[in-house]
Amino acid sequence: MDGPATKREDGAVPRLCLSFAPLDGAVRGALADIHDHLAARTDPDLLARVEIALAETLNNIAEHAYCGRDRVAGEIAIALHGSSRSLDFEIVDDGREMPGGSPPPGHLPQVDGVPVDQLPEGGFGWHLIRRLSTGLAYERRGGRNHVTFRISA
């Protein structure tokens, strides 16, 4: 699979590129690799936001883009560019297209008056991604999904 570009248009070389199958253990492993790569040179608050936004994005891809598809044969690729204060991500997968051709709006589920034991387990991901990032963009190109966003300190 052609993953994220290894060189951006401005000539900057990605700080990190990796790819993996959309399996639970592989997603956790990719998140750990990214954490290890950034931990020593990134603001802890920025790193925490990166971890949340990436976990939500990657889990959405694994759960929804590859739902009913062969996850073992699938692939997710990530390119990370930036500095210790601002990080740009490009995530590419060959799973299903996002419904409506764009990321969900990220409205929070209605929880007022809902008993604790009936609170929803999901529905918060796109809200978190949108709150933690800027420049969120999605494009379906060549049968692949391309999601980009920036997280800044």
Image (cartoon, helix red, strand yellow):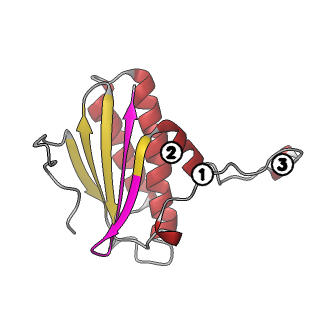
Residue 20, by quadrant, is bottom left
Q: Where residue 138 sits in the image (x, y, percent)?
A: 40, 59
Say whether disc 2 or disc 1 marks the residue closer to the N-terminus: 1
Q: Is residue 104 above or below residue 130?
A: below
**Which residue corresponds to mark 1?**
106
Say whether disc 3 or disc 1 marks the residue closer to the N-terminus: 1
Asked whether 107 falls inside the magenta stretch, the response is: no
Could you tell me the amino acid type at mark 3? Asp
Residue nearest the viewer, comparing 74 with 29: 74
Q: Residue at x 63, y 48 (%)?
A: 124
Quadrant including the C terminus: top left
Q: Secondary structure at mark 3?
A: helix
**Residue interval drawn in magenta:** 137-152
Q: Residue at x 42, y 62 (%)?
A: 23
Mark 1 burial class by Cα count in 10 Å: few <14, some 14-19, many 20+? some
As measured in the structure, the alpha-carbon distance from the residue carrying label 3 to the one carrying label 2 is 25 Å
Left or right: residue 82 versus residue 128 is: left
Q: Residue at x 50, y 78 (%)?
A: 68
**Which residue corresponds to mark 3?**
117
Q: Where residue 114 sits in the image (x, y, percent)?
A: 86, 48
As measured in the structure, the alpha-carbon distance from the residue carrying label 3 to the one carrying label 1 is 23 Å
**Which residue corresponds to mark 2?**
129
Q: Are marks 2 and 1 in contact (CB under 8 Å)?
A: yes
Could you tell me the amino acid type at mark 2? Ile
Q: Are marks 3 and 1 in contact (CB under 8 Å)?
A: no
Circle on res. 96: none
Residue 140, by quadrant, is bottom left
Could you tell me the amino acid type at mark 1? Gly
